[in-house]
Amino acid sequence: MVAVGASFGAITIAYGLPTWVPFLMSAVVFAGGAQFLAVGLIAAGNPLAAVLAGLLLNARHLPFGLAVAETVGTRRRDRLIGSHLMTDEVVAFTLREKDPARRRRTYWLIGVTLFTSWNAGSALGVLLGGATGDPAALGLDAAFPAGLIALILPALRDRTTRRVALTGAALAVVLTPVLPAGLPVLAALLGLFAVFIPRRTTDAEPGKQPDRAEAAKRPGGAEPAKRPGGAEPANRPGGADAAEQSDGGDARGREPQTETSRKGAIAC
């Protein structure tokens, strides 16, 4: 968190914004992604887009607040301070705890730690950015993008998520030369509509055996089930008739033997 905060402070100075801006935003806003997005749009001369993008990006805090409302507390002071400390990491660590007392301690401990480290990192970035003049010289400008890439890579394994992300990225790249600064980022949200694009399905995936329901729909019906012990079913063509003929032949073959034994008994 210190490294990401330092990246934010250095980038803010590199954009030519006043020194007090990163300190004020880190203390009052305390929203990493929204802060990076806001300083870029403000530097590009589009503060309205910065406000709209920040509201959209932080809309996820609404369900977060509902999930941790009881953990924060019922007093107004606790709710006011606790809502300001609420971040993705704080909510994630808090909801992993089952015991209410441990959950409350985790929320406040992680929240205060992240708030302190973020502001300390922002101050460090301002100092380093002002001293070097170019944040890229120390790689501070790449800290936040690298962190975001590391976070989203596991999610891109899902086909739907990957399609939405690639669609939004393509829209932002295509619209960047046409729209004012900040609007291509907002237009990237249109990539969410890629979820409603129907996917083409195949009959069976390679290497996957068709299930019995699919086999039953094919001409000829489903394959007959085998008997216990690996015996073949009796209802195959010629199976039952052959069994009856075999039984009948055995019976006829036993009749002469029975008649001969009777005559021998009478002669005796």
Image (tube, grey):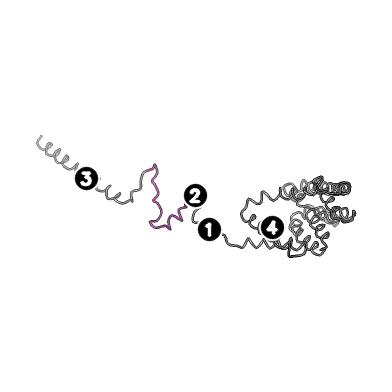
Task: Give the number of the disc on residue 132.
Answer: none
- The residue that mark 2 highlights is 208
Q: Amino acid at mark 1?
A: Thr
Q: Residue at x 80, y 57 (%)?
A: 40
Label 4 vs 1, first from the N-terminus: 4
Q: Amino acid at mark 3?
A: Gly
Q: Of discs 4 and 1, which sits in the foreground?
A: 4
Residue 21 lies, in percent from the top left, at 88, 55
Q: Residue at x 66, y 59 (%)?
A: 167
Residue 184 lies, in percent from the top left, at 73, 62
- Which range of residues does the magenta coloring cover? 209-230
- The residue that mark 1 highlights is 201
Helix, strand or loop under label 1? loop
Structural distance between the alpha carbons of marks 4 and 1: 25 Å
Which of the 4 image quarters holds residue 256?
A: top left
Report the front residue among 129 and 26.
129
Label 3 vs 4, first from the N-terminus: 4
Which residue is most to the left?
267
Residue 109 makes an appearance in the image: no
Residue 124 lies, in percent from the top left, at 86, 46
Structural distance between the alpha carbons of marks 2 and 4: 34 Å
Tag 2–tag 4 contact (CB < 8 Å): no
Structural distance between the alpha carbons of marks 3 and 2: 46 Å
Helix, strand or loop under label 4? helix
Report the front residue among 147 and 141.
141
Residue 28 makes an appearance in the image: yes
Tag 4–tag 1 contact (CB < 8 Å): no
- The residue that mark 4 highlights is 169
Q: Of discs 3 and 4, which sits in the foreground?
A: 4
Helix, strand or loop under label 3? helix
Helix, strand or loop under label 2? loop
Q: Amino acid at mark 4?
A: Ala
